[in-house]
Image (cartoon, rainbow, N blue to C red):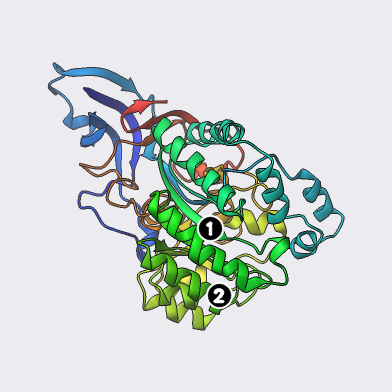
């Protein structure tokens, strides 16, 4: 089955030769075809070019023609860091923040991650799935074609497995590409407050082997930061994960200079995420690695944190990926377009850099760079068709606006 998208004002992120990521100053470059067409067959990109080249094109085997009507076409967003399987919401904590409580103070009162863990424990797997599928459908409609989802609101063997089974079911039921990450090391449960080693042993000896045995996750993650897990604890957990075939990813340096970036690089983590506290030492460590720095400005926006030094990182020659961190406590939104707006407004990234970060580089951070992230022959045909707009810079410029006309995931309009 073939589909032709015609009358595209700008076909964005066209890469004739596939690359893994866009690095440093190259992030300022965004390859484009003006007045273009795109051909899809059996869910795969097979051809593209200028509309001037389409005259006399053989439509005999084409089953569908889509008129983009002057809209822009670009790859669907890849959201490489989310927590969207959770129970309920936490707007009371939102009000607590307004009234002056910090993220850590809320956590000490039993809020934060522990609050979500309590709610999740009292929620059935079916109820959890029904809540999560609403969020999946929401982000697909906003142009996300691939998403990583973490566990971490279970904090018991049974509840972590429950979360991961919901993620697996979502992956089976929806066309969006989904990757699962085991994040049992998201917080220390209240009952282990005086027995941290007991909880570490539970993660290492019980949770990780079971997750690996049931093939419920591809990645292992740890919240390595002030007030959560130490570098030594993180080292132990990542080492155990790697022994069971899980690829490291890591929450690092959101709240302080935690040593998390260094530990992530040591274990060849696919990505290190958050990075509000990133200095020269951390940049130098990342420069010697293949680990993708992933920034989530919506978290800093929501919590009132200092933003990560994106410009300094790119000027040093690093790549950057962007993600939403969609979760109930610190970033309750999965709108990647708003993340791009924050990247441009607060991180001082150009629209080209932001689009590269949210497509090519975020695909790398999720391990799907061979399949998604660019308009390349042979990759999955997952694209956004925008409403008619003046240029791609209008996407981050017009924050809050709904600019999506159609979303196509693996060749199918959703």
Query: Quadrant of residue 194 in the image?
Result: bottom right
Q: Residue at x 27, y 51 (%)?
A: 370
Up/down of 285 relative to 323, above or below? below
Q: Is residue 29 left or right of residue 272?
A: left
Q: Residue at x 44, y 43 (%)?
A: 392
Identify residue for label 2: 233
Q: Inspect this view and state whether residue 250 appears.
A: no
Q: Residues within 10 Å of mark 1 (few under 14, many from 20)?
A: many
Q: Is residue 194 left or right of residue 324?
A: right
Where disc 2 sits, the SS reads helix
Q: Residue furthest right?
A: 99
Q: Is residue 10 left or right of residue 196?
A: left
CA gap, disc 2 to disc 1?
A: 13 Å
Image quadrant in which the N terminus is located: top left
Instruction: Give how far across and how far down residue 154 sits, in percent.
Output: 61, 51
Identify residue for label 1: 183
Nearer to the camera, 265 or 238: 238
Instruction: Give how far across and how far down residue 86 sits, in percent.
Output: 62, 43
Up/down of 299 relative to 293, above or below? above
Q: Which mark is residue 54?
A: none
Up/down of 349 relative to 402, above or below? below
Instruction: Give how far across and how far down residue 108 sits, in percent.
Output: 79, 63
Nearer to the camera, 130 or 118: 118
Q: Residue at x 30, y 27 (%)?
A: 5
């Amino acid at each position: 089955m073939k589909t032709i998208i015609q009358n595209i004002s700008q076909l964005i992120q066209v890469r004739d030769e596939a690359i893994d990521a866009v690095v440093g100053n190259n992030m300022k470059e965004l390859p484009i075809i003006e007045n273009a067409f795109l051909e899809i067959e059996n869910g795969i990109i097979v051809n593209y070019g200028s509309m001037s080249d389409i005259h006399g094109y053989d439509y005999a085997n084409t089953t569908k023609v889509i008129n983009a009507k002057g809209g822009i076409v670009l790859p669907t967003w890849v959201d490489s860091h989310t927590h969207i399987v959770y129970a309920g919401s936490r707007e009371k904590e939102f009000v607590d923040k307004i009234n002056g409580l910090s993220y850590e103070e809320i956590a000490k009162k039993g809020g934060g991650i522990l609050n979500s863990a309590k709610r999740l424990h009292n929620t059935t797997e079916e109820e959890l799935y029904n809540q999560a599928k609403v969020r999946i459908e929401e982000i697909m409609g906003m142009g996300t074609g691939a998403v990583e989802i973490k566990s971490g609101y279970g904090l018991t063997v049974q509840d972590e497995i429950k979360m991961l089974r919901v993620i697996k079911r979502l992956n089976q039921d929806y066309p969006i590409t989904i990757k699962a990450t085991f994040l049992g090391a998201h917080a220390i449960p209240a009952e282990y407050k005086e027995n941290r080693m007991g909880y570490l042993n539970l993660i290492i000896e019980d949770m990780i082997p079971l997750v690996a045995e049931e093939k419920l996750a591809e990645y292992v993650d740890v919240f390595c930061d002030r007030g959560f897990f130490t570098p030594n604890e993180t080292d132990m957990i990542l080492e155990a994960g790697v022994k069971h075939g899980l690829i490291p990813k890591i929450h690092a340096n959101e709240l302080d200079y935690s040593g998390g970036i260094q530990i992530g690089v040591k274990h060849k983590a696919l990505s290190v995420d958050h990075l509000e506290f990133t200095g020269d030492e951390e940049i130098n460590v990342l420069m010697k690695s293949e680990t993708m720095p992933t920034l989530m400005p919506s978290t800093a926006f929501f919590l009132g944190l200092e933003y990560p030094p994106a410009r300094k990182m790119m000027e040093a020659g690093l790549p950057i990926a962007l993600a939403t961190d969609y979760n109930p406590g610190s970033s309750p939104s999965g709108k990647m377009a708003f993340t791009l707006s924050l990247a441009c407004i607060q991180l001082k990234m150009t629209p080209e850099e932001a689009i590269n970060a949210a497509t090519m580089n975020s695909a790398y951070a999720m391990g799907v760079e061979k399949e998604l992230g660019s308009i390349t022959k042979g990759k999955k045909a997952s694209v956004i068709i925008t409403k008619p707009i003046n240029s791609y810079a209008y996407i981050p410029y017009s924050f809050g606006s709904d600019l999506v006309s159609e979303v196509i995931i693996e060749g199918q309009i959703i």
